[in-house]
Image (cartoon, coloured by chain):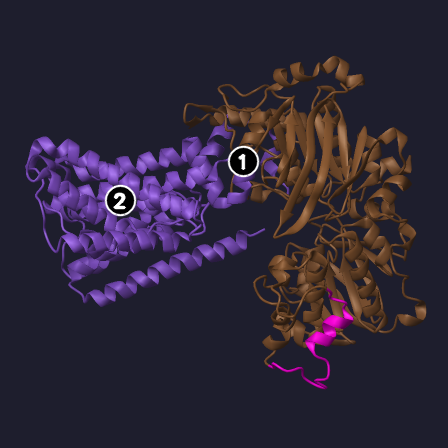
Chain colours: A purple, B brown
């Protein structure tokens, strides 16, 4: 292996830069080019159809649409990087929306306790997922699918439609803004930045990559791999709860179909994978996921504007997801060994 | 030895603590006689197969204690128990006068025991620094102190004189095999442990790199670190170790002072008999016939270049080389797993194309892979199903041609004992598993057999059985290509030896070459120790 630049010992500056680039996803740059291409294509097509695309209103609406999926996908990124995944998030989103709306019942003084309660539920569900995956060695796909089904059963037994009502002050989370920037966009930014920082700069984040890369190697190096996987599951469930809170603030009351109708389980995984994170874990990052979320949102927006048949939209989305993963697989093969 | 990185709170046993434990100045010349580590009566079974039986080991501060044994003798399992990666079924571990139980590798690390594993334990997607400090990242609160980690890594690499080639922020995937091994060593050195276990650290190193490693080992020893050194290279043990414990078939044979023993004595303890009787006789000139499989100018982009070899009917062609030299890649190319991009493959003088394993099987080739548990067998399937795996995949349940020989008869000729046809192969011993792999190919009437590390993980008695079988197959007209990293096996079994280096053929040696002749071709370096 010859490395021309390696003959120089390398000052501290270069070294730090190297760490940064290695921890943040090295795959993230190309996916933003794809995002740009899809954005431009959507712009041209929608404009040709005589519909608004590059307006403040439309762009804001696209961003806000990205918030719900973006938050939970950020959490999904962590759990996938750790070599697991979470299919229970869609129903957890409904649970968070319903429980918070029921606790509040329009009373602003209950906002705090509602948020605390649903965050607590998120921790419990995440802990359950994590324990099933690590201690009982149940495949993550099955374990979280099972937990999701249990949540669905509980929801459907107790509710069939809207229940409770959020406090009017709470709706700020869905509709408010600071200056020109919607609060919800800030919420998404904070979540993505938080996850990025966590992955890049904390021991937990480093260990997530290590466990996802090879759990055995991480374990033999002294990493408590089970704790890392459980932690990743808890974090993912907390982001699902956050998405639930955001959605209920917009819809103003909880309902059991909020999560599953949004398809947040499979969509969040799709966004992560389109963003270049390896489904097997250990490689990728949250910036790629954000691009994946935007790509899905642009396609949504464009097809809605064109008032096309939604089947076509699904076909296009399917093609994009498959193409993205195929391209990553090719790149991996070329880089291999 | 670099200083402890700033802000590191959990890095186990910084230098001074190890030093006080062992009084380094005295330890440098005369190791304390009270052991720092005692393992007593260690017993361990996997799937009911005993791997360790009542093994004792004691190691003193400031000594290099070699643990010697054939593959499958239980060395690695004993060390994994010491490192907390496995838990013993019975026995005690006393460290520094206190009984300890390690439920997790991190507990062993915190107690001052660290290990460098035989197989690479590096994460290819992470940087050198991240790999070295994995699980022990210098940190401020929950945050990794990347600056301190980079600095500590750079100093560590400088102390190994490799700072120019290996930089802390390089992704491990981009390093060569030897560089990765160096990172592995740097990682082990970074532990500042009381007890450091090195499990065959020189397997992929050139003599030059081995010398550098030994220099480091001596330095650690002088600092009072107790080093457990696992190897089956006897010469290394005489060079570096003070005492040696020999294991055989999961039992301790004995512990002796290195100065008071001899190669001959150790071999006897290891093998239980003299080496001379160990291998079946080579082929006589009359037994070797025409070339069956030949490669002319074969290449696989980035892995193999200009390969010219031929395997003749009736001979065993040995392939040597360091780990990463292209040995396994050559076997995979021949068998169509990752075919040659360039050059020509000939079967019985006619050019053929083998683009997949299936085509190779159709040409009556068989590939006994290095990792039989993943590539050779389907563990939950029975002996019968595994034996028929390749034959069935060719589309015929029944044996084509004569149909006379059933699997049961085949296994009888292979002397597969103690396992019924319906037994799941995961319950079989390594030697019997290997016979099932062989049965799989013989069922397809394989005439050209590739063996990649044929006796890895097989105990000594069964090893001889496999060797006898291989020779018998050659005598019955098979052409055999055997890859081995065990030099005695390579020397003892091969009718000719071809040595690979960096994906090219470094040279060919006649029957019965010396170890240093092979190493010279494998590394391109004159072996200083043996020349002296």
Q: For this rendering, which residue is in front, B251 or A271?
A: B251
Q: Of all residues shown, which one is farthest toward the bottom? A: B402
**Quadrant of res A130:** top left
Q: Which residue sits at x=86%, y=60%?
A: B496
Q: Is label 2 or label 1 in front?
A: 1
Give the secondary structure at mark 2.
Answer: helix
Q: Residues within 10 Å of mark 2 (few under 14, many from 20)?
A: many
- Residue A169's x, y, as percent? 8, 34
Q: Can residue A60 be seen in this view?
A: no
Q: For this rendering, which residue is in front, A151 or B528?
A: A151
Q: For this rendering, which residue is in front, B526 or A256?
A: A256
Q: How many marks?
A: 2
**Quadrant of res B58:** top right
- The chief SS type of the magenta part is loop
| Residue placed under numbered mark 1 in the picture | B104
- Residue B220's x, y, as percent? 71, 24
| Residue placed under numbered mark 2 in the picture | A240
Residue B441 lies in the magenta-colored region: no
Which chain contains the residue that carries disc 2?
Answer: A
Q: In this view, does A325 lie to the left or right of B415?
A: left
Give the secondary structure at mark 1.
Answer: loop
Q: Is residue A7 left or right of residue A131?
A: right
- Residue A127's x, y, as percent? 34, 41
Relative to B512, residue A75 above or below: above
Q: Which mark is residue B421?
A: none
Quadrant housing the C terminus of chain B:
top right
Q: Is residue A69 visible?
A: yes
Q: What stretch is highlighted in magenta?
A: B396-417
Q: Which residue sits at x=42%, y=53%?
A: A139
Q: Which residue sits at x=64%, y=32%?
A: B92
């Amino acid at each position: 292996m010859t490395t021309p630049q390696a003959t120089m010992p390398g000052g501290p500056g270069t070294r730090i830069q190297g760490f940064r680039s290695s921890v943040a996803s090295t795959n993230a740059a190309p996916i933003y080019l794809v995002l740009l291409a899809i954005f431009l294509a959507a712009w041209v097509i929608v404009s040709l159809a005589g519909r608004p695309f590059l307006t403040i209103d439309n762009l804001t609406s696209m961003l806000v649409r990205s918030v719900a999926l973006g938050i939970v996908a950020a959490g999904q990124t962590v759990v996938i990087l750790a070599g697991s995944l979470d299919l229970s998030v869609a129903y957890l989103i409904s649970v968070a929306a319903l429980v918070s709306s029921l606790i509040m019942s329009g009373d602003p003084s209950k906002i705090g306790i509602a948020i605390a309660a649903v965050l607590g539920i998120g921790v419990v569900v995440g802990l359950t997922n994590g324990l099933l995956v690590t201690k009982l060695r149940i495949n993550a796909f099955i374990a979280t699918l099972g937990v999701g089904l249990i949540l669905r059963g509980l929801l459907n037994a107790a509710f069939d439609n809207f229940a409770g009502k959020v406090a009017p002050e709470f709706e700020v989370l869905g509709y408010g803004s600071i200056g020109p920037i919607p609060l919800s966009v800030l919420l998404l930014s904070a979540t993505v930045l938080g996850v990025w920082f966590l992955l890049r700069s904390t021991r937990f984040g480093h260990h997530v990559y290590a466990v996802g890369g090879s759990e055995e190697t991480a374990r033999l190096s002294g990493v408590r791999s089970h704790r890392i996987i459980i932690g990743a599951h808890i974090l993912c469930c907390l982001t699902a709860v956050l998405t639930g809170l955001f959605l209920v603030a917009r819809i103003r009351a909880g309902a059991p179909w909020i999560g599953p109708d949004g398809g947040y389980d499979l969509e969040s995984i799709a966004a992560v994978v389109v963003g270049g994170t390896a489904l097997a874990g250990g490689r990728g990052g949250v910036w790629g996921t954000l691009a994946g979320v935007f790509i899905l949102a642009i396609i949504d927006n464009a097809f809605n504007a064109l008032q096309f048949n939604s089947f076509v939209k699904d076909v296009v989305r399917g093609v994009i997801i498959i193409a993205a993963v195929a391209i990553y697989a090719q790149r991996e093969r070329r880089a291999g060994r | 030895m670099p200083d402890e990185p700033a802000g590191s709170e959990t890095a186990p046993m910084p230098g001074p603590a190890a030093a006080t434990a062992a009084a380094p100045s005295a330890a440098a010349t005369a190791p304390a006689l009270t052991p720092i580590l005692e393992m007593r009566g260690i017993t361990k079974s996997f799937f009911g197969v005993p791997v360790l039986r009542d093994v004792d080991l004691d190691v003193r501060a400031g000594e290099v204690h070699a643990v010697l044994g054939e593959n499958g003798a239980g060395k690695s399992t004993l060390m994994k128990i010491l490192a907390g990666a496995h838990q013993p079924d019975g026995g005690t571990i006393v460290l520094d006068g206190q009984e300890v139980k390690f439920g997790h590798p991190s507990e062993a690390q915190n107690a001052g025991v660290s290990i460098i594993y035989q197989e690479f334990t590096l994460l290819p997607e992470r940087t050198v620094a991240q790999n070295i400090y994995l699980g022990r990242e210098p940190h401020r609160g929950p945050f990794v102190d990347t600056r301190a980690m980079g600095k500590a890594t750079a100093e560590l690499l400088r102390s190994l004189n490799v700072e120019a080639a290996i930089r802390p922020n390089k992704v491990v995937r981009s390093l060569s095999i030897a560089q990765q091994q160096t990172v592995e060593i740097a990682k082990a050195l970074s532990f500042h442990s009381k007890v450091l276990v090195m499990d065959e650290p020189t397997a992929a190193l050139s003599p030059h790199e081995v010398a550098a490693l030994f220099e480091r080992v001596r330095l650690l020893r002088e600092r009072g670190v107790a080093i457990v050194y696992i190897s089956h290279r006897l010469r290394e043990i005489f060079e570096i170790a003070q005492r040696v414990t020999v294991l055989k078939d999961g039992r301790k044979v004995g512990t002796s002072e290195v100065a008071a023993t001899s190669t001959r004595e150790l071999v006897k303890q290891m093998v239980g008999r003299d080496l001379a009787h160990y291998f079946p006789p080579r082929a006589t000139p009359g037994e070797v016939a025409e070339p069956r499989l030949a490669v002319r100018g074969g290449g696989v982009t980035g892995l193999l270049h200009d390969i010219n070899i031929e395997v003749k009917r009736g001979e065993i062609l040995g392939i040597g080389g360091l780990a990463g030299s292209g040995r396994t890649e050559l076997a995979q190319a021949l068998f169509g797993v990752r075919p040659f991009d360039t050059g020509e493959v000939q079967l019985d003088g006619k050019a053929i194309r083998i683009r997949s394993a299936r085509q190779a099987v159709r040409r009556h080739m068989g590939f006994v892979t290095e990792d039989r548990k993943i590539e050779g067998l389907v563990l939950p399937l029975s002996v019968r199903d595994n034996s028929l795996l390749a034959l069935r995949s060719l589309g015929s349940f029944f044996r084509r041609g004569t149909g006379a020989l059933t699997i049961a008869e085949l296994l009888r000729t292979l002397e597969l004992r103690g396992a019924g046809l319906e037994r799941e192969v995961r319950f079989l011993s390594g030697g019997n598993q290997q016979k099932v792999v062989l049965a799989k190919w013989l069922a397809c009437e394989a005439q050209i057999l590739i063996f990649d590390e044929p006796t890895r993980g097989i105990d000594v008695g069964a090893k001889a059985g496999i060797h006898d079988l291989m020779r018998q197959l050659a005598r019955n007209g098979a052409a055999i290509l055997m890859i081995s990293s065990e030099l005695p096996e390579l020397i003892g079994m091969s009718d000719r030896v071809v040595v690979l280096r960096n994906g090219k053929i470094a040279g060919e040696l006649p029957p019965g070459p010396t170890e240093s002749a092979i190493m010279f071709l494998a590394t391109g370096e004159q072996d200083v120790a043996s020349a002296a």
